[in-house]
Each structure stands twice: as structure tokens, then as C-alpha cells.
């Protein structure tokens, strides 16, 4: 379950059009707006004037990855296994882990934030659990 990137308390229903962070309310959006850093994207081909961009829930893997990251892409079936894991759900009940995940998500330098988080035993346990779920053998699911 994802939490609002601003208050870290509610389930996000909206996405900032500039930087794509997820937030739960107008109040959180107004708080975020003052510190928003728009995502720099390459120039896109011209979009017809009658077309609008709509951000829909739930998010997809493509929201998170760029073309350069496709090698490391995990299939949607594997990602959905994360949501079904009781062990992962229990870990995510820990408010310290949730706050840590939000701080990584909101960090300007994600790689530095990840390196720092990997020093936290709780985050290492969370990472190992996620990897164990998405890396399990295909034969395991067929049995």
C-alpha cells in the first residue's frame, strides 16, 4: 500500500503534474507545491491539441522506469506477488520503514538515499524480502 509523499499518512489519490509524486489531498498538494521540482523530460513529439494527459490509478511499472532501465524491469505478475506477501505486509506495518521509504522516494538524489538506507538493517530486511519474492523460481508458482 502506498502512502502520500507529503503527509505519509493517507493513501494517495492524486499525482503532481510537474514531478509525478503522489499525494492525498489539496492540502498536501499546496504544501508540496512550494518545494516541487519538475521532472525534466526529453522533448516529446507534438501532441494533438484535443488530447489531454490523464494520470490514472493504479500506477504502472512504466511510470517508474525509463527506456534505459528496461533490462532491470520486473514483470507485472512478479510485482503483483509483492502485494500478496504476508511477510512484506508485516514489514510495512513498521512506521520507521514507511518513513524511510518515503524519504527515499522524496530524495533529490535517489542513489545516495538508497546507499544510506542500505545501512539500516530494517531496510535490508525489506529489500531482501522484495527480492526473494520477485526472484523466486517460475517452477515454484506452478506447484
Image: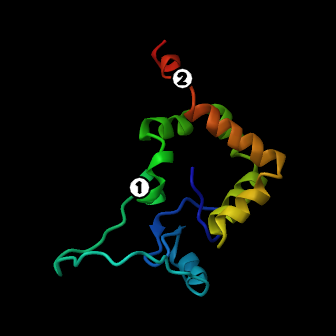
Is 91 above or below relative to 31?
Answer: above
Residue appearing at x 69%, y 46% in the figure: 92
Identified at 68% across, 36% down, the residue is 129
The residue lying at 48 percent from left, 70 percent from top is: 20
Secondary structure at numbered mark 2: loop
Residue 41 location (% of width, % of height) = 42, 75
Q: CA distance from mark 2 to mark 1?
A: 24 Å
Residue sitting nearer the eye, 125 or 42: 42
Q: Residue at x 48, y 54 (%)?
A: 69
Relative image position of residue 105 (x, y in whole percent): 63, 63
- Which callout, 2 or 1, points at the residue further toward the start of the chain? 1
Please tell me whether mark 1 sits on a helix, a strand or a loop: helix
Note whether 96 is above or below 112 in the view shown. Answer: above
Quadrant of residue 48 in the image?
bottom left
Disc 1 designates what residue? 62
| Residue in front for this viewpoint, 81 or 136 | 136
Q: Which mark is residue 137?
A: 2
Count of labels in the image: 2
Amino acid at each position: 500500500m502506498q502512502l502520500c509523499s507529503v503527509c505519509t499518512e493517507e493513501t494517495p489519490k492524486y499525482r503532481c503534474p510537474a514531478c509525478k509524486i503522489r499525494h492525498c489531498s489539496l492540502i498536501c498538494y499546496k504544501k508540496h507545491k512550494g518545494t516541487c521540482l519538475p521532472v525534466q523530460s526529453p522533448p516529446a513529439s507534438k501532441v494533438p491539441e484535443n488530447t489531454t494527459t490523464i494520470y490514472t490509478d493504479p500506477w504502472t511499472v512504466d511510470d517508474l522506469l525509463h527506456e534505459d532501465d528496461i533490462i532491470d524491469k520486473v514483470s507485472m505478475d512478479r510485482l503483483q506477488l509483492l502485494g500478496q506477501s504476508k511477510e512484506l505486509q508485516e514489514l510495512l506495518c513498521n512506521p520507521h520503514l514507511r518513513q524511510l521509504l518515503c524519504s527515499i522516494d522524496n530524495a533529490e538524489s535517489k542513489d545516495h538515499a538508497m546507499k544510506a538506507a542500505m545501512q539500516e538493517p530494517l531496510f535490508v530486511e525489506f529489500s531482501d524480502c522484495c527480492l526473494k519474492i520477485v526472484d523466486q523460481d517460475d517452477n515454484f508458482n506452478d506447484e
